[in-house]
Image (cartoon, grey):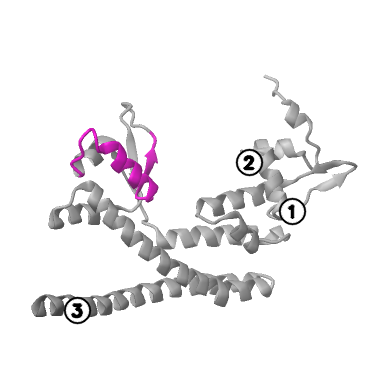
Amino acid sequence: MAEHTSPLEADSVPDGFVVEELARRTGVSVRSLRNYQSRRLLPPPDLRGRTGYYGAEHVERVRLVQQLRAAGLKLDGIARMLDSDTTADGPLLAFTEHARGMFTAPEPEVTTLADLVDRFRLDADSAPTVLETALRLGLVREAPEAADGEPRVEVVAPALLTAGEEAMRLLGLEATGALDLLERLRRHADGVAKLYVELFVDRVWQPFVDAGKPAVAWPDVEQALDDLRQLATRALEATFDLAMVHRVDRVLGERLLG
């Protein structure tokens, strides 16, 4: 059977293809690609007359941007990480995946929506709101339906969701109260994460970029991020213990003297 050639593929040439073909290969709209280019996220195409032609390096760069966005980075932040040299895109993508794996649960749990409703003792009225909050907080995300068509969700942070269940049991909270507690904890954790990531960028990443991202230095950058994770964990635990000592002393003192 003869292979069908689309009009877009017909626009391709052996050493390049037009922006519509780049959009088709990456799943990113032409409008978004133009935006990437204006933000210097995408190297300029090879101009031949008034037509720009793209290549494999542009496909890889777009995929890298998509990966970095999926990791939670904003376009402005991504632009600061990238430059016109696409040869470092592969190591950067590997580093990003390494960093994401370092801070996420290795195996998210997949469960049915019915099981999640049962675990948190949700009724028909509260279930939609609670599940929407859990999705917004990143605790769960939608997963493909089961073979029998039953809705499923992926529990992204099983330990954190279990902590919510424990809060319900120990403190007598309803699911909405437990999620509110987790959301407030998340805000404090975001502040700590911001502090350490900014420290990593200023003290490790930027000097690495200024040096031209030498290939031999990638292992040192990865090790620095791992060291920072361990330092942040130890410091956060110690700081929390210290804060609890002062808080307990203050509260008990007020109650005993009150």
The segment highlighted magenta reads 120-144
Q: Work out whether 150 lies above or below 126.
A: above
Image-quadrant location for residue 236: bottom left
Q: Does residue 37 appear to the left or right of 106 in the view shown?
A: right
Measure the C-alpha gap from mark 1 to mark 3.
58 Å
Give the image location of residue 153, x and y in percent.
34, 40
Q: Earlier in the sequence, mark 1 or mark 3?
A: 1
Residue furthest front as drawn: 258
In the picture of the structure, the residue carrying the numbered disc 1 is 43
Inter-mark Cα distance, 1 to 2: 15 Å
Query: Which x, y percent locates residue 11?
Result: 79, 32
**Amino acid type, label 3:** Arg
Any part of residue 206 in sight: yes
Which residue is denoted by mark 2 in the rendering? 26
Determine contact: label 1, label 2, CB under 8 Å: no
Q: Is residue 60 magenta?
A: no
Quadrant showing the N terminus: top right
Instruction: Answer with left or right where residue 127 lies relative to residue 132.
Output: left
Near-viewer residue (99 or 240): 240
* Helix, strand or loop status at disc 2: helix
Q: What element carries label 1?
A: loop
Type of amino acid under label 1? Pro
Residue 249 image position (x, y, % from top left)? 18, 80
Tag shown at residue 250: 3
Q: In which quarter of the image is residue 243?
A: bottom left
Q: Position of residue 148 (x, y in %)?
A: 31, 26
Camera-nearest residue between 32 and 231: 32
Magenta segment includes 131: yes
Sequence-wise first label, 3 or 2? 2
- In the image, what residue occupies the spot 71% across and 36% down? 21
Say if 212 sits above or below 102 in the image: below
